[in-house]
């Protein structure tokens, strides 16, 4: 009696078919593949960014598309589009996102956002850049997942608006990217946003880098002050992230003073930042004045006649972090 022994290929083909079916179901349900992990945690020094060509859970979005420059974006397919992000957070967060397109220009102004049941007030710029604050109370009981709900008045079929188009999908708005950042945490983390306690006559207002959604401020005087909260009677490490300066000489001469006393600094250039670090001995006062000192301030117009920026500038600062030393625990 001859028995037919199954070959390895006869086992592999059903397995591959099963995997392909699961992938197809995921794509049909979510538009994109689900994430492989939910361990995305936002400590004070970290931000989360989604370019809509990555893995994420969603309802009401089409999959990633790419423009001529190979920049990714994703259209909403429903008036209510849900984005489920497995983000762990304990404090208030800032959300910033940019739209690439809208099927109707009115949607730019009528777009709303809520997290769970909490409406999020949005500020819109002329470049369709939106920002808002997600309070910690909006997270609810789901400490490991955050659901962002974007709502537009409707969706429209592109071909009905323009018969020459071949796109028969119902479209709402197209997302370019989205970031979620920790908010300024007094006494621990200063993100140089609206909440940072700087001297208004020493610093310019917060600015945002459009393609990275980074908040920063330029100093406007050679010695620019801010007020910080210090660990009381505990040694700590102070770290400053500087994005740019008017010249290399400015960075080379950059100094930090705490209550008028110079801090010994080490410097490391990484992540497109100049990272300055100081080990600070225990302080007897809980409040301190941190001074950012440069040799001088100059305007971009002085360096480049084509520039329209006549402001005197020193350094642009992204953040200040304070961390108690391990020996102080």
Image (cartoon, rainbow, N blue to C red):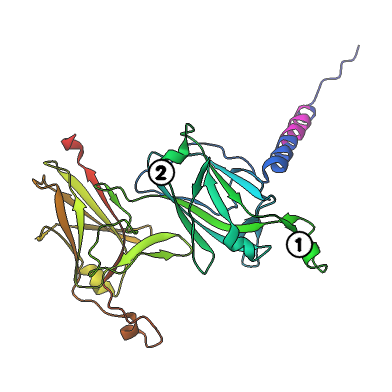
Q: Along the horizontal axis of the image, is 135 left or right of 251?
A: right
User: Which segment is the magenta one?
Assistant: 11-19
Q: Along the horizontal axis of the image, is 162 left or right of 282?
A: right
Q: Along the horizontal axis of the image, is 277 left or right of 179?
A: left
Residue 136 shown in magenta: no
Circle 2 residue: 42
- What secondary structure is found at the residue carrying circle 2? loop
Above-or-below relation of 307 to 123: below
Image x and y of residue 90, in percent: 38, 38
Circle 1 residue: 158
Name the residue located 20 percent from the left edge and 56 percent from the top edge.
227
**Mostly what secondary structure, the magenta segment?**
helix
Name the residue located 54 percent from the left edge and 65 percent from the top edge.
128
**Quadrant location of the N terminus in the rendered image:** top right
**Residue 134 shows up from this direction:** yes
Q: Nearer the viewer, residue 60 or 62?
A: 60
Above-or-below relation of 26 to 258: above
Q: Nearer the viewer, residue 14 or 90?
A: 90
Q: Earlier in the sequence, mark 2 or mark 1?
A: 2
Please tell me how crowded label 1 is: few (under 14), some (14-19), or many (20+) other residues with Cα within 10 Å: some
**Quadrant location of the C terminus in the rendered image:** top left
Q: Along the horizontal axis of the image, is 275 left or right of 288?
A: right
The answer to whether the residue labelled 2 contacts the one labelled 1, judged by CB atoms less than 8 Å apart, is no
Q: Measure how far apart labels 2 and 1 are at the Cα level.
A: 38 Å
- What secondary structure is found at the residue carrying circle 1? helix
């Amino acid at each position: 009696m001859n028995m037919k022994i199954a070959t390895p290929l006869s086992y592999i083909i059903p397995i591959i078919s099963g995997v392909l079916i699961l992938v197809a179901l995921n794509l049909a349900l979510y538009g994109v593949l689900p994430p492989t992990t939910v361990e995305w945690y936002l400590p004070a020094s970290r931000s989360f960014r989604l370019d809509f060509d990555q893995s994420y859970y969603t309802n009401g979005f089409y999959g990633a598309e790419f423009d001529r420059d190979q920049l990714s974006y994703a259209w909403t397919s429903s008036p209510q589009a849900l984005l489920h992000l497995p983000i762990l957070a304990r404090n208030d967060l800032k959300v910033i996102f940019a739209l690439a397109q809208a099927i109707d220009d009115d949607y730019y102004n009528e777009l709303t956002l809520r997290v769970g049941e909490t409406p999020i007030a949005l500020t819109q710029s002329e470049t369709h850049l939106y920002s808002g604050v997600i309070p910690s109370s909006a997270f609810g009981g789901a400490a490991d997942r955050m659901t962002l709900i974007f709502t537009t008045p409707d969706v429209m079929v592109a071909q009905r608006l323009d018969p020459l188009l071949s796109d028969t999908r119902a479209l709402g708005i197209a997302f370019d990217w989205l970031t979620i950042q920790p908010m300024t945490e007094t006494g621990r983390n200063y993100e140089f946003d609206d909440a940072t306690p700087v001297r208004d006559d020493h610093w310019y207002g917060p600015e945002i880098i459009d393609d990275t959604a980074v908040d920063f401020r330029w100093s406007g005087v050679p010695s620019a002050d801010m007020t910080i909260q210090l660990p009381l009677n505990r040694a700590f490490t102070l770290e400053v992230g500087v994005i740019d300066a008017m010249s290399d000489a400015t960075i080379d001469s950059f100094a930090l003073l705490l209550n008028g006393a110079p801090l010994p600094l080490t410097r490391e250039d990484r992540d497109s930042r100049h990272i300055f670090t100081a080990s600070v001995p225990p302080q007897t006062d809980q409040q301190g004045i941190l001074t950012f000192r440069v040799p001088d301030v100059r305007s971009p117009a002085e360096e480049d006649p084509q520039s329209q920026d006549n402001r005197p500038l020193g350094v642009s600062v992204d953040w200040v972090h304070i961390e108690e030393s391990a020996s102080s625990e």
